[in-house]
Amino acid sequence: MIEIPFHKYQGTGNDFVMVDNRSGLIDRNDKKFAQKLCDRKFGVGSDGLILIENHEKYDFEMVFFNPDGSQSMCGNGSRCAVKFAQYLAIIEDRTIFLSTDGVHTATIDGDTVSLSMQDVQPDKIVTFPEHFTINTGSPHYVIFASNIEHKSVKEEGAQIRYSDEFKEKGINVNFVEKLGKQKIAVRTYERGVEDETLSCGTGVTACAIAHVLHGGVSPVHISTLGGDLIVKFDLQDGAAKNVYLEGPAMKVYEGQIKL
Ligand SMILES: N[C@@H](CCC[C@H](N)C(=O)O)C(=O)O
């Protein structure tokens, strides 16, 4: 049994257990740690586990796990990791770091973290008559709907995520309501959590891109169940470039857990 010090962070209600793993306390290849720490009944409980590790070339490396132990890019988690790296005095108010899908930069202003996302090339944006699939580091299904406050996001999201087309690799499912040229509301079912979360950073980025492809204008202000985010980008030759995800990221508490 080992005692693991952890910090809990949230970004618009998407919550993460953070572990300073610069000493190699946790084996990053052992996905059971994520399953245990993220368990809301037997562990700390969160939408993901993030390990902060040393990196030769960048300020740090962020290793992200979903609660089921799978790995992908996490936008809100990256914003929280940046705040945690500031708390650990690895960085001051700007950084360049490595995440699951490559190198990111970020700036911090109080509790607001602005994160650069990878360019989304045209082959990652697929338009169907009723929906989009867009990969913003993680795969997203984006569907426009009305009155999303009344949607059964868990049930309807799970139907798409476990459909024949997606059941093997999984997909995150986003329901988007247009509120204006520069405003949308989003609710997201996340794979790996297998439930609705209060917010999803890569998800709202995909939704903002879909919104602009439908006539919206960047920057797009996004309302989620857990708070507000802003996504900015330039649409050039069918690609989304200079993509930024901005919003609050905060520490909630810290503790130790025996595993
Ligand atoms: N909450 C995240 C996305 C986390 C990864 C996702 N569940 C997946 O497996 O694709 C975000 O803020 O982007």
Image (cartoon, grey):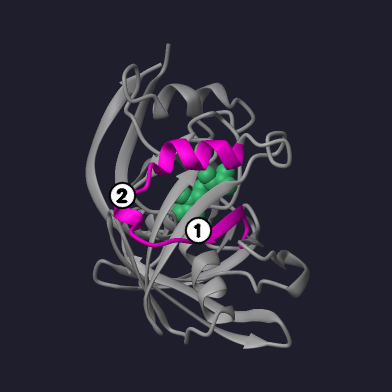
The residue furthest left is: 253
Classify mark 2: helix, strand or loop. helix
- Residue 18: say if magenta: no
Task: Count all numbered tags in the image, as a single digit.
Answer: 2
Give the spatial CA distance, label 1 vs label 2.
19 Å
Closer to the observer: label 1 or label 2?
A: 2
The CB of the residue at mark 1 lies under 8 Å from ligand 1: yes
Q: Quadrant of the C terminus?
A: top left
Nearer-N-terminus badge (1/2)? 2
Q: Quadrant of the N terminus?
A: top left
For the residues bearing labels 1 and 2, Cβ distance under 8 angstroms = no
Residue at x-position 48% and y-position 32% = 67
Q: Which residues are magenta?
A: 136-161
The residue furthest top is: 1
- Residue 150: say if magenta: yes
Report the amino acid beneath label 2. His
| Horizontal side, residue 111 vs residue 106: left or right | left
Please provide percent x and percent y for residue 5.
33, 31
Mark 1: few, some, or many residues within 10 Å (few <14, many ≥20)? Answer: many
Give the quadrant of residue 161: top right
Residue 189 visible (yes or no):
yes
| Horizontal side, residue 26 vs residue 46: left or right | right
Determine which residue is flagged by label 1. Answer: 203
Mark 2: few, some, or many residues within 10 Å (few <14, many ≥20)? Answer: few
Report the amino acid beneath label 1. Gly
Determine which residue is flagged by label 2. Answer: 150
- Residue 10 drawn above or below residue 116: above
Please provide percent x and percent y for residue 245.
45, 70
